[in-house]
Image (spheres, rainbow, N blue to C red):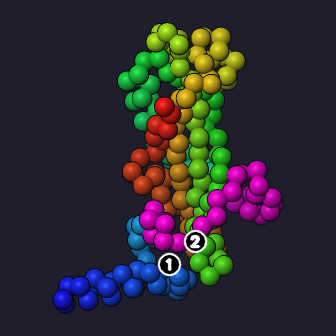
Amino acid sequence: MILFLIFCANTLFALENFESLSAWKTLSTEEQLDHIYNYRIDSTEVDIAEVTDPKLKVSIDEMQSDALKNIDTDEIYNDIDGMENIASIGDPSLSSVTFYQIEDETVVIRLYFYQSGGATSNDRRPSQTHFESESEAIADGVDPESDVSWQAEAYFSWDGQNWRPMSYTNYEGRGFNWSGW
């Protein structure tokens, strides 16, 4: 019975953490990410094209630049080596932004990145592992419409003055990971 009461008290405190801005600020980065990963904080996801505020756009551009320097791309190359008939195409693109709010204040921003790729239809290894453009890939027999892609996430928290990096990985603890077929 005592263990059950302790569990209930801990659960109530955990629920309070994502509803109270002051409680949120006392959590460690790992605890904050746990609340995010387990959907215990209000969020709104928007396509990057929907972000129109100039100041916010500048902040997101800075976060994007920082994230792309730090997100691990090893999984992309491991997948390409393991499957032999695939390649990555172009630069990673920022496709959406998620705003996590407590008491109407954005406390965390998640950037969602997408890396496109393609595959040959005859299981032939492409002449290179990465193509700068779709036209280069097509010329080598790589179909950019095949379901080959990778995704990555980066999280940034607001410290009251600046956006600071929290994590360059997803809940699985990796950088770019396979999201294709």
In the displayed structure image, the side of residue 2 where residue 169 appears, left or right? right
Q: Nearer the viewer, residue 159 or 2?
A: 2
Q: Residues within 10 Å of mark 2 (few under 14, many from 20)?
A: some
Real-space Cα distance between discs 1 and 2? 8 Å
Q: Which residue is tagged 2? A: 42
- Residue shown at 42% from the left, 55% from the top: 171
Confirm whether the magenta stretch covers residue 89. no
Q: Estimate the x, y position of residue 147 in percent, counting from the top left.
A: 55, 29
Q: Secondary structure at mark 2?
A: strand
Q: Secondary structure at mark 1?
A: loop
Q: Quadrant of the N terminus?
A: bottom left
Q: Which residue is mark 1?
A: 18
Q: Is residue 73 above or below residue 35?
A: above
- Picture coordinates of residue 79, whole percent (x, y): 42, 29
State the image coordinates of residue 62 (x, y, percent, origin top left).
66, 55
Q: Which residues are magenta?
A: 35-63
Residue occupying image coordinates x 58% and y 16% = 142
Q: Which image quadrant for residue 63?
A: bottom right
Taking the image as shown, residue 169 lies to the left or right of residue 68, namely: left
Residue 59: horizontal and vertical position, in percent? Answer: 69, 60
Q: Are marks 1 and 2 in contact (CB under 8 Å)?
A: yes
Relative horizontal placement of residue 19, taking residue 60 as reference (left or right):
left
Q: Amino acid at mark 1?
A: Phe
Number of numbered discs on residues:
2
